[in-house]
Structure formats: structure tokens, C-alpha cells
Image: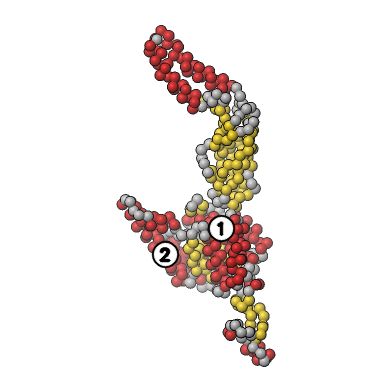
Amino acid sequence: MIYPTRTAILATVIGMPVAFLVALLVPGRWYAALAWPAAVLLLTLVDALTGARPGSARARVTLPSSVGVGTEVPVTLDIAVDGNVQRAQLALQTNALLEAADVAPAWVALEGGRGRFHLPFRAVRRGTAQVERLWLRWPGTLGLSWKQQVFPLVASTAVLPDLSPVQERGARVFERHSLDGLMAQLQHGDGDDFDALVEFRAGMDRRSIDWKQSARHVKLHAKEMRTERNNQIVFAVDCGRQMSEPVAGLSRLDRVISAVLLTGWVALKLGDRVALHAFDSRPRVASGLVSGTAAFGALQRLAAQIDYSGDETNYVYALSSLAGQLTRRSMIILFTEFTDPTSAEFMLGAAARLLKTHLLLVVVLRDEELEAILDRAPASSDDVTRAVTAAALLRDRLTVLTRLRHLGAHVIESEYDRVPDRLVEGYAALKRRNLL
């Protein structure tokens, strides 16, 4: 495709007053007024027919095999144009899973008509991200014509749950908690599992004395305990409409999946068994219990299958189905979001039934948007109305969380960027208290 540039159009427009003035002052030689636009048109044609033409360009795009959601995607573009082209302008078309840092076409410099460029994109949703088309255009020698070529591209990458919290924070988690009894094999004296019978020493807890064995050995002996292993940890992830809404450019669902993977990795390292369940109006992903660090890959693949949904969450159906699959007391970590009192009542009823048998930890993200509206100084009557509405919603939210605590559930309300750390801390605290 060849078409005039803005320079050619402006040159034609600038010459129009001159053409009208010539036609007005010299009516007998009106055809002289056509000299200016004819000259611009001729130069534009010359510019279009010389130099590199459309069809002489080649392009190739390279993507990594997989990236984490919410991370930068390194899109590498190789361009080659036959001819002495010094610069070009390009734009990429992608599907909805990729977001460009700048939507305007980018100017790139070419050396000998060739160049390699790294374009900034960001993965905003899980799934298969695709680069579908490239528009490449370059100006002629005189700058009066654009020469454009469109390339249909077939390049894709798998957008998976972000593993950076696991890779970056995993080691720090063990460094932080190993001295506090989180790792059972390194810490004795806490827990419910019997480990060894030792002679009683000064400083030991007197409640650990085994009086029967002490009488038999005619010396004081104490039981040394260790933290219980092989606990069942079940991640119940709400993937309904509320969880699919974005928070700071990334959906709530993707935020909590990163926390699931980090905490799941820690639990597997500690010898616990882990299961993953996802639900909206009905259960969507239901896994069995897995153990050992080798099972983390399976947990990651299951987390990648959790899709975004526009359905309302059915707590009664989903949590009742989950409870029916569990044969022993488990720690259920529920990730959810609620806004209306009706859905909150259903969640409270389902949570009350779970708490009769299991330990329940509820994780929600703080609604920082409502808090910002409430803290902002009002400048108009509309701002006052919004602040009153936000205060009412936050009050209802606090009421629901308080009722959950009164039922016996443990609640974590976290900032969106601290969910993985807060969840690991909560899991470690409950494990040290041996509530299972």
C-alpha cells in the first residue's frame, strides 16, 4: 500500500491560496494555478516509485514459550527492508491477553534496512497470548509518500500463573520461620506427634514429664514432641464474577493464585498434603491430595486451568461438594470476594457447616478503592454521596468478616501486593499452634 504523507497533504493545502490568487488575478491563465498541486502530485509519485517498495520487507516475531501473568513479555521483532531505509514505523496487533505499554505506532531506526527491536508488552490474563499482525511503514526519500506492508503473524506464548513469588520468596520464607518451629524435622518440643523419650533437663516443660516411664527408670523422663506432618491443606478458590475484576491492572484471581502457589510449595516442603479446588456457580477444578515437592508441577498446571468467569458464586453447592470429598479434618483456605449481603449470608452459612469439622482460613483482598474514596476530601455533592456509599459498603464488609471470626474462622484481609506473604505467615502461625 502506498499513500501520501501528512507533508504531501500540507504542501497541497498550503498551495491552494496561491492557486486561487493566480486564478483571480490572471483569469486568462487560470491553468497556471494548477502548477502547484500538479508539482506536489508529481513529486509524490516520484517518491512512491523510487526506493524500497511494499513487498520488499520481511519480519519475524519471537516470543518466549511461557510467561507469568502480570509480568513483562519480551517481544522480539526482526525487520529487514530491501533498500536504503533509515527509519520505519510499526504497530503490532495482539489478542486481549497482552497489553502494550504505548498504543501509538513506534518509530524505529534501521541500519542498512535491518534491525532487531524489543517491544514492551505486559501479560494481563492467563491463557494463550498471540501476536496476530504487524503493520510496517516507511517514508519515501522525499518524505511525501508512505509505503506500508502488513504481515500476518502466528506467534503465541502460554501465560501461566506467576511463579516469581515462589522463586523469590520461597527461600526467605524458610530462613524466616525455620527457627520458630516451622520445619518439623529441625525443631523438637512443639507439636502433637511423639518423637522421642529423653531424660528431663532443666528448662524443659514440666508438663512433658512421662511419670510412668520415670517410675520405671527411677529417673525423670520427658516426652519430646514434633510438629505434626501429613496435614491436609485444601485451597478453595472462588473464580466467580467478583474475583475476575481487576485490582491494580491484574485480576483478584491472579493475585490469589500466586499466593496459592507459594503457600502450596511451602506446605509440600513441610510434608503436608495439598489439594486445589476452584468454583463459581459450580465446581470447576477439583484435584486430589498430592504430597512431596515433586507434585508442585501438577499443582501449577491445575492452577493454570482456573479460568475467569462471569457467573455468580454458589457457596453452598461448592463448599458442600468440597466437604463431601474430605474424609478427615483439614485446613481449608478459602479465597473469595463479596459485595452484596445476600451472597455474604450464603457464604456464612456454608462456612458454619465447614467449621463443625474443619479448620477454615478465609483470605480476602482489601478494597483499597473504597478506602480511597472514603479518605478523599469531598469537593462536590457527588463526592459526598460516593463517600457515604463507600462507608456503608465497608461497614457491611467489616460486619461479615467479624461474623466469620465469631464463627471460629480465621480471616486474613490483605493488600493486593502482600497476599502471598500474609498467607504464608498465617499458615505458619496456625501450623505452629497445632490447630489441626
The image quarter containing residue 109 is: top right
Frontmost residue, 396 versus 199: 199
- Residue 76 is situated, as x and y percent measured from the top left of the image, at 62, 41
Q: Report the amino acid beneath label 2.
A: Leu
Q: Which residue is mark 2?
A: 398
Q: Which mark is residue 201?
A: none
Q: Which residue is mark 1?
A: 257
Q: Report the amino acid beneath label 1.
A: Ile
200 with respect to 315 (left or right): right
- Please name the residue shown 31% across and 52% down the image: 381
With respect to residue 197, does 154 lie above or below?
above
With respect to residue 218, does 96 lie above or below?
above
For the residues labelled 2 and 1, the Cα–Cα distance comes to 24 Å
- Residue 205 is situated, as x and y percent measured from the top left of the image, at 58, 83
Pointer 1: residues within 10 angstroms few (<14), some, or many (20+)? many
Q: Indicate the colouring scheme.
A: secondary structure
